[in-house]
Amino acid sequence: MMAAAAALLVLRWGTAGSRGGLRALPGCEKLGSRWCLITSHKLYSSVCDPNEKTFEKLLIANRGEIACRVIKTCKKMGIKTVAIHSDVDANAVHVKMADEAVCVGPAPTSKSYLNMDAIMEVIKKTRAQAVHPGYGFLSENKEFARRLASEGVTFIGPDTHAIQAMGDKIESKLLAKNAKVNTIPGFDGVVKDADEAVRIAREIGYPVMIKASAGGGGKGMRIAWDDEETREGFRFSSQEAASSFGDDRLLIEKFIDNPRHIEIQVLADKHGNALWLNERECSIQRRNQKVVEEAPSTFLDPETRRAMGEQAVALAKAVKYSSAGTVEFLVDSSKNFYFLEMNTRLQVRVDSGIQQGSDISIYYDPMISKLITYGSNRAEALKRMEEALDNYVIRGVAHNISLLREVIIHPRFVKGDISTKFLPEVYPDGFKGHKLTDLERRELLATAASLYVAEQLRSQRFLGTQRIPIAKSKRSTWELSVRLGDGIYPVAVSKDGSSFSVEVDGMKLNVTSEWNLASPLLSVTIDGTQRTIQRLSRNASGDTSIQFLGTVYKLQILTKVAAELSKYMPEKAAEDTSSILRSPMPGAVVAVSVKPGDMVSEGQEICVIEAMKMQNSMIAAKTGKVKAVHCKAGDTVGEGDLLVELE
């Protein structure tokens, strides 16, 4: 089953005295092609020593791009790998890459990737000496780390006590306070039920953030502005937390309105040494999940950066941390910063865990790729990212490339004027794609018309010769009618060598390309401006879809005569959707709140659909009586499936 997919962008740019977006810290020296930290005659380096003893076999307790990344590294180091997978992941890329692969259960994470008993059995069976947990799933589970230790299996990550301290948001907040790290005001215990959640929220003062104690990745988090939202948030957050992490405990704290989300990377060893490696800004978020990351942040000054780094190191030392980790902070407009959480993992790379033919399941995160671009300055890194997004070729699933592209070219982002509310502020009615300027609209119309004519010319030739040798000389001009959105535009095209002269809105544009119509990507030059486009579909009725400036546009291209005749064709009546409820996405039905004969009000919850570990409340579009219910709790539904009918 296919689902909407997502990509994460990571933007890194350097400044004077920096490399790869990370500035040289005091005591840093450049050795060959890498930066190393030198302190008291000690050398710290990430380069693998081929003479150093390594594990013979390692099990990866994860899936997707992180599992693929670990396997690639193990192969470079000569370490054999064991992949685990659910039954729906049997043909996943990480399964194919690993030396061995074992199924640990059915699709639900609680029965597979969170199934400690099954994973421990695989470890014994394969004789793996170590386990890399990746991120999410069991990576911050102290019980898993304890069980590994009891079997003499090495956990690739921090010690058990650090996992317990940092993997639990309630305990980590208390430890942060003791380490004199700035924390967000709130309730530091476990919230027992919805009534207690309301009482605590009132004491703290609205708005509040409800979040999973064992959570991460934006799952199990809800913002509440009143008592009703607190009750609803408690229900959804606890269910998501139980589904994603096997732990439904929640905490409540004050919601910092309009903050920036900035993370500090830390590295620590088992000898009490710890250092911070500057920051990543992750303020561009959707549903509390990061969409774009940038290093360094355009907002921080040297003093604030140093203070955040020092507090991050203080926290790492307080819990005797010994691994790579990320300390997350919220930063307000006055550069006051507050500890959010510490993740016991390392983030930021270019990775993908899928290939052609892969399924993106409803049961797991929709991440299909991470794109990272570098540059000697921010403008160069942004330009490279824009070009890279235009060259992404993804077919078969919906994706968010158009949104990502719009974010990085938006004037506010370019200026660095961002916060965690960027997306709802810039797109209050939701993102609906790139809005074409008049010039861009003419460029798209001219490109589409040129593609149409290029294809017409190709269809007249066979192995380099005309199909009918006695045919009349080739046409040199075409009069077309192009529909784009609600507009219909007359377009005149004339051929001039390998170029086309196109007249749109009384203006002439010169369109040049190699016109390789078999390629998924097409580089087109329009009056000297280079554009990379993709034609996604076409049919005999003249309908075509073109990805232009990151957004897919639907057009209809007809000859002038065909356009005149098309007005006599009847149009299909649109479906009345006010009396039916269809699933907006593939997912699993968590709960159904109505039965046939029930009266429902407009806005009333009908059912709950869980997709990609996020729960979504489906509501009635109008007041009426339930005619039929076509789903039940536990059902798997596809996008567009009929759920409920009203009379």
Image: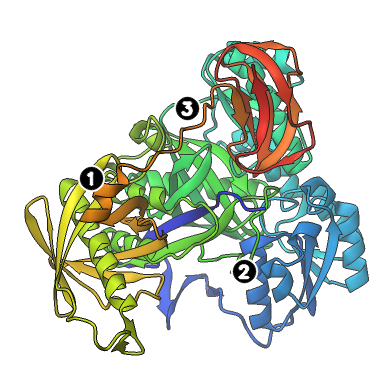
Give the image's coloring scheme: rainbow
Q: Residues within 10 Å of mark 2 (few under 14, many from 20)?
A: some
Separation (CA) of disc 2 from disc 1: 49 Å
Q: Which mark is residue 488?
A: 1
Residue at 58% from the left image edge and 21% from the top image edge: 579
First in sequence: mark 1 vs mark 3: 3
Q: Which residue is mark 2?
A: 69
Q: Going 78% across and 47% down the picture, which residue do you hit? A: 108
Q: Could you tell me the amino acid type at mark 3?
A: Ile
Q: Is residue 151 left or right of residue 635?
A: right
Name the kind of residue labelled 2 in the image: Arg
The quadrant in which residue 10 appears is bottom left
The numbered mark, 2 or 3, whose residue comes first in the sequence reads 2
From the viewer's side, name the closer residue of 201 and 47. 201
Q: Residues within 10 Å of mark 1 (few under 14, many from 20)?
A: some
Q: Residue at x 53, y 75 (%)?
A: 41
In this orientation, does residue 24 appear? Answer: no
**Label 3: few (<14), some (14–19) or many (≥20) C-alpha neighbours in 10 Å:** some
The amino acid pointed to by label 1 is: Ile
Of residues 39 and 150, the one drawn nearer to the viewer in this rendering: 150
Q: Position of residue 262 (x, y in %)?
A: 45, 45
Cα gap from disc 2 to disc 3, whole angstroms: 35 Å
Image quarter of the C terminus: top right
On residue 256, the disc is 3
| Closer mark to the observer between disc 2 and disc 3 | 2
For numbered disc 1, what is the local secondary structure? strand
Instruction: Judge whether 454 appears above or below 390 on screen.
Output: below
Q: Secondary structure at mark 3?
A: loop
The image position of residue 90, as x and y in percent, is: 77, 65
In the image, is 217 to the left or to the right of 119?
A: left
Q: With respect to residue 619, does 147 lie above or below?
A: below
